[in-house]
Amino acid sequence: MNHHQNAIFHQLDNFIKHSHSFAMTIFHKITKLAKLVILLIIPTYAKVS
């Protein structure tokens, strides 16, 4: 593998790692938000029924 191919491979590797961590951050935020919404809805629903 020459230097140019190595540089491209390294950039791709960094991009994939960054994309993965970014996706996981969004996933965790959505999960936390969903838990919060569920915790807010359950007591309200329990009072109504």
Image (cartoon, rainbow, N blue to C red):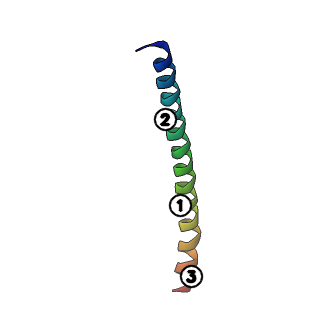
Task: Give the CA distance from mark 1 to mark 3.
Answer: 19 Å
- For badge 2, the amino acid type reads Ile
- Of discs 1 and 2, which sits in the foreground? 2
Viewer-closest of 41 and 15: 15
- Of discs 1 and 3, which sits in the foreground? 1
Q: Which residue is mark 2?
A: 16
N-terminal label among 1 and 3: 1
N-terminal label among 2 and 3: 2
Neighbourhood count class around disc 1 (C-alpha, 10 Å): few under 14, some 14–19, many 20 upward: few
- For badge 1, the amino acid type reads Lys
In the image, farthest residue toward the bottom: 49
Q: Which of the 4 image quarters holds residue 47?
A: bottom right
Viewer-closest of 19 and 4: 4
Q: Which residue is mark 1?
A: 35
Q: Which of the 4 image quarters holds residue 48?
A: bottom right
- Residue shown at 46% from the left, 24% from the top: 9
Q: Quadrant of the N terminus?
A: top left
Image location (x, y in percent) of residue 40: 59, 69
- Residue shown at 58% from the left, 77% from the top: 44
- For badge 3, the amino acid type reads Lys
Q: What secondary structure is marked by label 1?
A: helix
- Residue shown at 53% from the left, 33% from the top: 15
